[in-house]
Image: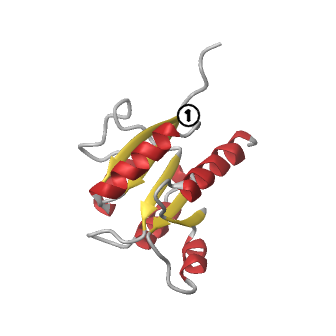
Amino acid sequence: MGSPQKSVVLLLEDDEDDIYICRSALEHSKLNLELFFVCSVCEAMDWVAGNPPFDDRKVYPVPDIIVTDLRTPDQSGLEFVRWARARHELDGVPVIIHSGSFYPGQVQECMECGATAAVEKDSRCRQLIEAISHSIAHASHH
């Protein structure tokens, strides 16, 4: 038996410090993840759609889980969630919104747009790790 397959996680994050924190926390978690980062909604859309330069699926695999920052330079993370939920190839792929803060009612708005979870950023990414872990466990029961 080989080792269990890694879950491919695509993280849409434009802040270098947050990228470092997320990468460090997720790599030190007990989750079996293969991490990829993009910096904009446009890059994430191109990756998911397999558009150049992301058209080699051996190098840029279809993600098992997508994490998006709520606030990105080009578009809102909510716009990405709406776009992702309209794509058949992402049926069943968890999309987690990760944000420094949410205004009242915004978590509900995220869920209504189709997000699987909406979690706040913290220094050890505890909520994010928990949301990813839950998504993996949920997927393994299907």
Q: Quadrant of residue 83?
A: bottom left
Along the line of sight, which residue is nearer the eye, 48 or 108? Answer: 108
Front residue of 83 and 139: 139
The image shows residue 45, relative to residue 70, as above or below, that is above
Q: What residue occupies the far bottom of the structure in this picture?
A: 104
Left or right: 108 as drawn, with respect to 101: right
Q: Is residue 92 visible?
A: no
Residue drawn 49% across the image and 53% down it: 124
Q: Is residue 77 left or right of residue 139?
A: left
User: What residue is drawn where x is 42% and y is 70%?
Assistant: 70
Which residue extends farthest top?
1
Where residue 130 appears, as percent x and y from the top left, is 62, 53
- Amino acid under disc 1: Asn
Q: Can you identify the residue that label 1 sits on?
A: 32
Q: Is residue 115 above or below residue 45?
A: below
User: Residue visible at 44% across and 70% down?
Assistant: 100
Residue that extends furthest to the right in the rendered view of this protein: 141
Give the quadrant of the C terminus.
Answer: top right
